[in-house]
Image: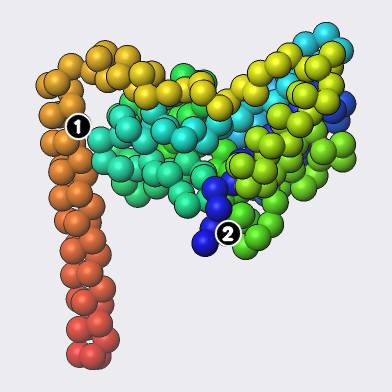
């Protein structure tokens, strides 16, 4: 049985080399967005960033929450929680309401504004690699093990051990264990009027009908072509 995976980032080990940033770009076929990766920001073409604070560095990427707000507010089930622990997105189901962007306490999901077929974009925790028994691209590329990928319970144990063995080195808290709980979702949902939610369901129905209509039109077109071939 596949255990839920996660990422442990240790700021004290990060040297700001950007290996994780570039590995993510390569793995997801994302275009270059800034010559200086330290000045780049999360976008539909950048799923993780390295941020500098004085002499320290930190990473920013999807937290893949245990109880994701984006999953709970999505009207059409475009977001889901994978067995690997990854929070995934299905563009074929999305109706573009962008409630996920409003609900996320970490402001992670980004929208493709400059395309006629926009999607919501973000880190996938390398779900396809994890299912093959591999590490996430960012963890595999990290030269100092500042980013670790593994079973959640093992990562928590490693973090607790580091805190206890080096109390002078770490602030005694593991960020991410209790943050981003369901109350964030409730706050987000309170901002969405009931009529909008109903409208969302209606839009999802219209989306399905439109998609089905286009599919039938395509099938009819192909059928007509086949008939003409036989006639000739």
The residue at the point 51 percent across, 21 percent down is: 179
Label 1, on which residue? 200
Q: Nearer the viewer, residue 225 or 216?
A: 216
- Image side of residue 36 versus residue 137, left or right: right
The residue at the point 79 percent across, 28 percent down is: 162
At which x and y percent is residue 189? 27, 20
Q: Is residue 159 above or below residue 24?
A: above
Rendered image: mark on residue 149 = none
**Real-space Cα distance between discs 2 and 1?**
33 Å
Rendered image: mark on residue 131 = 2
The residue at the point 83 percent across, 25 percent down is: 165
At which x and y percent is residue 25? 69, 41
- Image side of residue 43 versus residue 134, left or right: left
Sequence-wise, which precedes: disc 2 or disc 1? 2
Q: Quadrant of the C terminus?
A: bottom left
Q: Nearer the viewer, residue 13 or 162?
A: 162
Callout 1: 10 Å neighbours few (<14), some, many (20+)? some
Callout 2: 10 Å neighbours few (<14), some, many (20+)? few
- Image side of residue 188 versus residue 101, left or right: left
Q: Disc 2 on helix, strand or loop?
A: helix
């Amino acid at each position: 049985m596949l255990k839920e995976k996660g990422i442990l980032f240790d700021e004290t080990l990060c040297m700001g080399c950007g290996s994780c940033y570039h590995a993510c770009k390569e793995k997801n076929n994302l275009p270059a967005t800034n010559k200086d990766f330290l000045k780049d920001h999360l976008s539909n073409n950048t799923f993780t960033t390295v941020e500098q604070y004085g002499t320290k560095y930190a990473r920013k990427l999807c937290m893949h929450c245990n109880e994701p707000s984006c999953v709970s507010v999505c009207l059409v089930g475009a977001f889901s929680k994978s067995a690997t622990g990854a929070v995934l997105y299905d563009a074929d189901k999305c109706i573009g309401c962008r409630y996920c962007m409003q609900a996320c306490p970490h402001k992670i999901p980004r929208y493709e504004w400059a395309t006629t077929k926009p999607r919501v974009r973000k880190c996938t925790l390398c779900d396809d690699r994890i299912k093959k028994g591999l590490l996430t691209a960012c963890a595999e590329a990290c030269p100092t093990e500042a980013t670790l990928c593994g079973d959640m319970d093992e990562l928590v144990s490693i973090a607790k051990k580091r805190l206890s063995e080096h109390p002078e080195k770490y602030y005694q808290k593991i960020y991410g264990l209790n943050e981003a709980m369901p109350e964030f979702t409730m706050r987000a949902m309170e901002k969405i009027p009931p009529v909008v939610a109903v409208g969302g369901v209606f839009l999802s129905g219209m989306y399905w009908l439109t998609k089905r209509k286009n599919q039938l039109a395509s099938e009819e077109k192909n059928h007509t072509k086949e008939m003409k071939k036989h006639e000739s």
